[in-house]
């Protein structure tokens, strides 16, 4: 699965299907079902001016139903994000 990470955030591409069970026999295997990238996941952190994580903050993508709430340390993960969305 394609992934990009830095010290402050991670982007993971959301692939459908997420997994596929196959058995490889002699001579190889052909996968008929394509894997499609449906978007990507963005992980980040909401911090206050002192650099401390802020829990309970809702992070949303404008004009979508995609949102998530920061955890106790201020981290949040949004899934199925596409490049044309705006975060606020």
Image (spheres, helix red, strand yellow):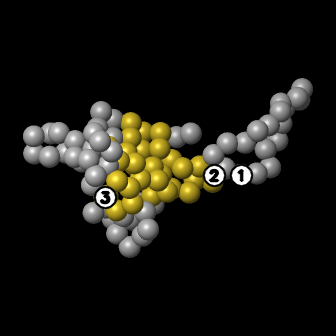
Image quadrant holding the C terminus, namely bottom left
Residue 72, position in %: x, y? 29, 42
Residue under label 1, please give it. Answer: 34
Of tags 3 and 1, which is closer to the observer? 3
* Location of residue 33 with respect to 67 vertically, above or below: above
Sequence order check, earlier mark of 3 and 2: 2
* Location of residue 86 with respect to 10 vertically, above or below: below
Of tags 1 and 2, which is closer to the observer? 2
Residue 30, position in %: x, y? 82, 41
Of tags 3 and 2, which is closer to the observer? 3
User: Looking at the image, which is closer to me, 74 or 33?
Assistant: 74
Structural distance between the alpha carbons of marks 3 and 2: 26 Å
Q: Secondary structure at mark 3?
A: strand
Residue under label 3, please give it. Answer: 58
Seen at 63% across and 46% down, the residue is 18
* Location of residue 57 with respect to 47 vertically, above or below: below
Seen at 80% across and 49% down, the residue is 32
Residue under label 2, please give it. Answer: 16
- Residue 44 visible in the shown view: no
Structural distance between the alpha carbons of marks 3 and 1: 34 Å
């Amino acid at each position: 699965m394609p992934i990009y990470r830095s010290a402050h955030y991670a982007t993971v591409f959301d692939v459908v299907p997420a997994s596929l069970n196959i058995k490889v026999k002699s001579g190889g295997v052909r996968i008929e079902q394509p894997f499609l990238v449906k978007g990507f996941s963005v992980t980040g952190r909401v911090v206050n001016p002192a650099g401390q994580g802020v829990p309970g903050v809702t992070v949303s993508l404008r004009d979508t139903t995609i949102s998530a709430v920061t955890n106790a340390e201020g981290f949040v993960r949004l899934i199925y994000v596409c490049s044309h969305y705006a975060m606020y």
